[in-house]
Image (tube, rainbow, N blue to C red):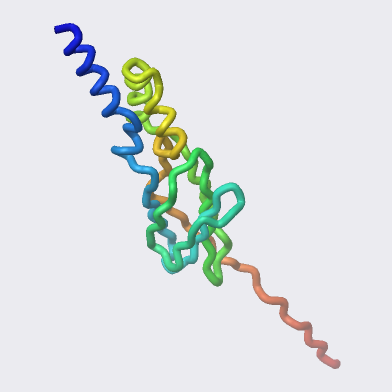
Amino acid sequence: MQSVAVAGLLGLSLLLCGCATVFEGTSQSIDVVTNPTGATCVFEREGKPIGTVAGTPGPLVVKKSKYDITVKCTKPGYQEAAYLNHSGATATIAANIAVDIILTAGISSIIDSADGADNKYDSVVNLSMVPDFAMPAVAAVAVAP
């Protein structure tokens, strides 16, 4: 009877390998909403562009990673707006890691870390854009007395 319990526990531990990979996935959608709408937003990770939303509001599907994503939005007549979307583990992932250490000696957490599944970004980015009040230089006109 004990061998059946041990075999069942081992089978369960194999099913849990890569829990976040299976349940959370290795990519996620991030929606960008700007005020005003119609901005172009570039997503960058480690200083390199990874995708663009051509007109807000709109989504971009990104591969999860331990590295943060910077979202930079531009629109004519407005100053550039930026948002740093931090990569981090969720509370659910933290609980899974604790269980994983007990059941699989951390093997599934290693799998999740390797493919980025144990990270998550904010799923909605809201940015308010400030009008650019810079006025073009006006040529001075000399008036004769």
Left or right: where does residue 36 sit relative to residue 21? right
Q: Position of residue 51 (x, y in %)?
A: 49, 59
Q: Residue at x 40, y 34 (%)?
A: 112
| Residue 145 quadrant | bottom right
User: Considering the image in quadrants, where does the N terminus appear?
Assistant: top left
Q: Residue at x 59, y 47 (%)?
A: 46
Q: Position of residue 66 (x, y in %)?
A: 50, 38
In the picture as drawn, the residue positioned furthest to the right comes out as 145
In the picture as drawn, the residue positioned furthest to the top comes out as 2
Figure label count: 0
Q: Position of residue 40 (x, y in %)?
A: 49, 65
Q: Nearer the viewer, residue 6 or 104?
A: 6
Q: Residue at x 37, y 28 (%)?
A: 108
Above-or-below relation of 99 to 60? above
Left or right: where does residue 40 sit relative to residue 11? right
Q: Residue at x 81, y 90 (%)?
A: 143
In the picture as drawn, the residue positioned furthest to the bottom comes out as 144
| Residue 8 quadrant | top left
Left or right: where does residue 8 sit relative to residue 70? left
Q: Nearer the viewer, residue 121 or 106?
A: 106
Above-or-below relation of 119 to 8? below
Q: Position of residue 20 (x, y in %)?
A: 34, 35
